[in-house]
Image: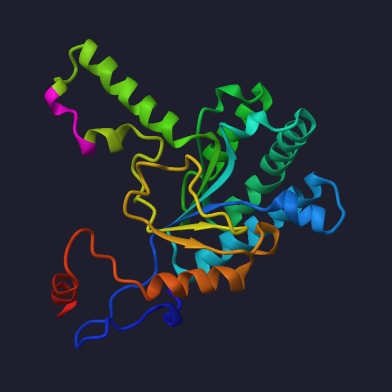
Amino acid sequence: MVNTSLQGKSGIQGCVPDRVPRHVAIILDGNNRWAKLKHLPGLAGHRAGVARVREVVEACADHGVEVLTLFAFSSENWNRPKMEVHGLMHLFLHVLKREARRLKKNRIRLKVIGNISRFSPEIQQRIRKAEALTAEDYVVTLVIAANYGGMWDIANAARQLAEKVDRGEIDSQQINEDAMEQHLSTAGLPAPDLLIRTSGEQRISNFMLWQCAYSEFYFTDTLWPDFGRDALQQALLSYARRQRRFGKTSEQVEAEILC
């Protein structure tokens, strides 16, 4: 059930519109800084961040959010120190083994997007098993962006379309925005309504460049391991107070809301 505290009037007489985003995307940032502040090794911050993932996923389900996408590991993160990358891969594998049945029990579907071919065979196998296990009877889709980059996603979609043209399956004149979206890694999912970035950074860092064309942005200084249910509530309330116009005027949007 949607939390009614996240529904609000539009400021005019008429219907109360749904103020809960269908799709929330989050750039998980600040794990290392959190660990440094506590004089802990960097991987301790990532472990603490995993606990927050569980809490935020459950909070999204409570609020009626349909899709939650988490930017967990970018294609540029391979450039981090080798020991940190190794630790992250070990943690990723551990989480896949431990959390898959919990996700199924809570009716959460797992979908991993990105170029997973660079991961070890064991991680790739665990991803496929977790996705298959949670594919049916779900209320929330949890999308993990791993070895993901927005430019890679667009280029990959363009390559697939070019190959279809070469095979004579489609004509080049058929390539448009809808065709591109159908070949992105997020095909079949709604575009993010709200993009959250933690830790005070105010950029999207090559994350879902196409999909976030009209997303509302929310930046917070809170480090990801400290971003829990209450912090998510504040982000959702901020979203609820905004008017999304998609190129229209305020008057047009308000008129469409009227019963």
Query: Does residue 26 lie above or below 234 as drawn?
Result: above
Please name the residue shown 15% across and 72% down the image. Answer: 256
| Color scheme of the displayed model | rainbow
175 in the magenta segment:
yes
Q: What stretch is highlighted in magenta?
A: 173-178
Q: Position of residue 210 (x, y in %)?
A: 35, 41
Extreme residue toward the top, this view: 167
Left or right of residue 228: residue 213 = left
Extreme residue toward the right, this view: 39
Please name the residue shown 58% across and 63% down the image. Answer: 58
Q: Position of residue 77 (x, y in %)?
A: 63, 34
Q: In which quarter of the image is the N terminus?
A: bottom left
Nearer to the camera, 73 or 2: 73
Residue 1 is at least partly visible in this image: no
Q: Position of residue 229 (x, y in %)?
A: 61, 70
Extreme residue toward the bottom, this view: 13
Please name the residue shown 23% across and 59% down the image. Answer: 246
Counting the numbered discs, the total is 0
Q: Position of residue 98 (x, y in %)?
A: 72, 45
Left or right of residue 55: residue 137 = left
Nearer to the camera, 98 or 178: 178
Nearer to the camera, 41 or 22: 41
Q: Is the magenta stretch mostly helix, strand or loop?
A: helix
Left or right of residue 125: residue 245 = left
Query: Does residue 75 lie above or below 141 as drawn?
Result: above
Query: Does residue 108 lie above or below 222 as drawn?
Result: above
68 in the magenta segment:
no
Query: Does residue 14 lie above or below 20 as drawn?
Result: below
Residue 119 is at least partly visible in this image: yes
Q: In which quarter of the image is the C terminus?
A: bottom left
Please name the residue shown 28% across and 76% down the image. Answer: 17
